Image: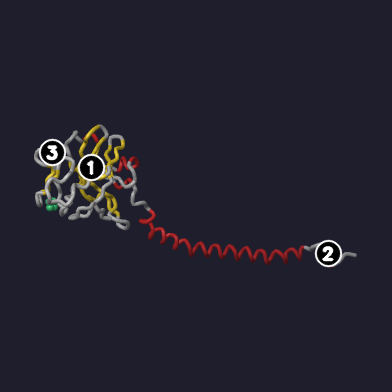
Amino acid sequence: MSSPEQQPTTLTDETALAAPRRDFVKGAIAIGAGLTAISAPIIAGATVFLDPLLRSKDTPADGQATDAASAGKPGYVRVASLDSLAKGEPKLFKVFSDCTDAWNCFHDVPVGGVFLKLIGPQQVIAWNSRCPHLGCSVETTAGGEGFLCPCHMGKFGPDGERINEISPRDLDQLDVDIVGNDVWVQFKNYRQGISDKVEIS
Ligand code: FES
């Protein structure tokens, strides 16, 4: 004679056991749906809020010529083509950026100027055109052999070196990268009126 534990399970018993399982599954689905509904707008809001931080400030697309954006190093802007430069003759170019800071992004905003000087095949020197004295725009001298600041007559030689005592330092040289026929510059502004080259962040 078999014990009660050994009795075969009846259909009624199985139905009774399945009911709590169904309730559990329904509850789990309801909790999951609730969490999804609550978290979706929170995630969307956080994404919008953090978007400027998540995007790299060094995105190469912030240059003047966005068609070549993928070629430049991060933090560099494309300024000109090599073809536009004549050897030994500094030439002034405007520099544009897409973003003014982490939170505001406008397309092609002028942020300054650079002089580019071709000194050899694939070799270019770049200077920020802002005078280190008080920030006026420097110009090339009439003969093109150096630079002159019209505000207080600060003078600089052909290599950007100061040749009178008005500016506290030489013209601010910038890093250059040549990619194919394009000249890319790591554009930076520096504090004026001091002898040290201190970047303005
Ligand atoms: S601002 Fe250039 S010499 Fe004064």
Q: How many labels does the image show?
A: 3
Distance from disc 3 to disc 2, alpha carbons, whole Å, reads 108 Å
> Given the current orientation, which residue lies at the most extreme right position?
1
Mark 1 element type: strand
Distance from disc 1 to disc 3, alpha carbons, whole Å, reads 15 Å
In front of the other: 24 or 104: 104
**x%, y% of residue 111?**
23, 51
**Disc 3 or 2, which lies upstream in sequence?**
2
Above or below, comparing residue 22 to residue 155 in the picture? below
Please give the residue where the numbered disc 2 appears in the rendered image. Answer: 7
Point 57% across, 65% down: residue: 30
Please give the residue where the numbered disc 1 appears in the rendered image. Answer: 126
In front of the other: 7 or 48: 48
**Disc 1 or 2, which lies upstream in sequence?**
2
Q: Left or right: 63 with respect to 140?
A: right
Amino acid at circle 3: Glu
**Nearer the viewer's eye, disc 3 or disc 2?**
3
**Nearer the viewer's eye, disc 1 or disc 2?**
1
Please give the residue where the numbered disc 3 appears in the rendered image. Answer: 145
Amino acid at circle 1: Ala
Q: Left or right: 27 with respect to 83?
A: right
In front of the other: 146 or 75: 146
Above or below, comparing residue 110 to residue 81 in the picture? below
Mark 3 element type: loop
Point 25% across, 32% down: residue: 121
Mark 2 element type: loop
**x%, y% of residue 67?**
31, 41
Image quarter (top left, top right, bottom left or bottom right) of the C terminus = bottom left
Judge the density around disc 2: few (<14), some (14-19), many (≥20) Cα neighbours within 10 Å.
few
Image quarter (top left, top right, bottom left or bottom right) of the N terminus = bottom right
Point 35% across, 56% down: residue: 52
